[in-house]
Amino acid sequence: PEVPPLLEVNNIEVVYSDVILVLRGLSLKVPKGEIVALLGANGAGKSTTLKAISGLLKTEDGEVTRGDVTFAGERINGIDPHLIVRRGIFQVMEGRRIVSDMTALENLRLGAFTRRDREVGDDIERVYGYFPRLKERTGLAGYLSGGEQQMLAIGRALMARPKLILMDEPSMGLSPLLVQEVFGIIRKINQDLGVTILLVEQNARMALSVASYGYVMEQGKVVLDGTAAELADNEDVKEFYLGGH
Ligand code: ATP
């Protein structure tokens, strides 16, 4: 029998402020242990899709008005974001949203807010293993470079020991070298820890290099999906998202 996906989004419609219809029947699946890419132009509704899953939509006056979000076999639409974190979903927001007037270490501890176990200290060391630079930075997180802030945001997500990480534009604002580095770490986290990742990216080339499967969104719907290899080879994807090469 077929294994049900860890995350299934089925035909959702999302409305902001009761009027603005942004998602119009969006469906996607994320199998356990995989990296799935969600691609599409600015304003297609990628961030909204992640927020519909994490529950953060509520904080922006948005609502899922139709369809279902199912995680580990249970329907989670309408649940408060902090309870969704407890179920094992952690969103790394676009623009990083670290707490700038706390240190990197304090930010990492914040990521573990749902946990009561005593292994938090070990996990901080493990995050430093992925991001050694964070250990050296003892000042306020607001003074970290863009790349370091992105690393801290990913490290903070790991501290929650999530089953699923929703990543919004990890390449944003980073130099090409840092993009390579951050994507290398994303791949490693997925392989070492078995964390499932749904990845929103403008940088389709990088996203498809780490993902096993991908979806392309336009105007609030999926218009194309396939394995990462199929998408990388698709003429429309090449023309619109891979710069024609
Ligand atoms: P980007 O990469 O630019 O963030 P995206 O594909 O992630 O694009 P969304 O951010 O999900 O797209 O936005 C989709 C549409 O929803 C846009 O037209 C945007 O203006 C609108 N939108 C997003 N957030 C809100 C909000 N809080 N209230 C009203 N409209 C919103």
Image (tube, rainbow, N blue to C red):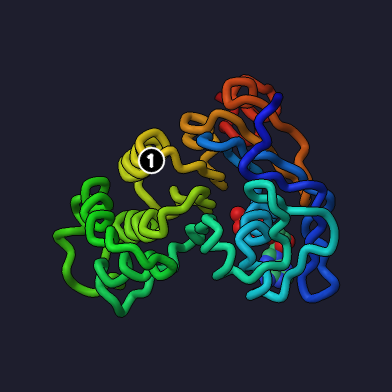
Q: Quadrant of ligand 1?
A: bottom right
Image coords of residue 183 (percent x, y)? 39, 40
The reply to whether residue 188 is in sight is yes
Between residues 6 and 48, which one lies in front from this camera angle?
6
Residue at 25 percent across and 50 percent down: it is 126
Viewed as shown, does residue 12 lie left or right of 168? right
Between residues 58 and 234, which one lies in front from this camera angle?
58
Residue labelled with disc 1: 193
Q: Residue furthest bottom?
A: 101
Residue at 82 percent across and 68 percent down: it is 20
**Image quarter hosting the C terminus:** top right
Image coords of residue 3 (percent x, y)? 65, 31
Viewed as shown, does residue 42 lie left or right of 94? right
**Image quarter hosting the N terminus:** top right
| Residue 228 picture quarter | top right
Q: Secondary structure at mark 1?
A: helix
| Type of amino acid under label 1 | Leu
Residue at 51 percent across and 42 percent down: it is 196
Residue at 52 percent across and 49 percent down: it is 164
Image coords of residue 27 (percent x, y)? 76, 44
- Give the mark count: 1
Image coords of residue 137 (percent x, y)? 18, 64
The reply to whether residue 143 is in sight is no
| Residue 48 picture quarter | bottom right
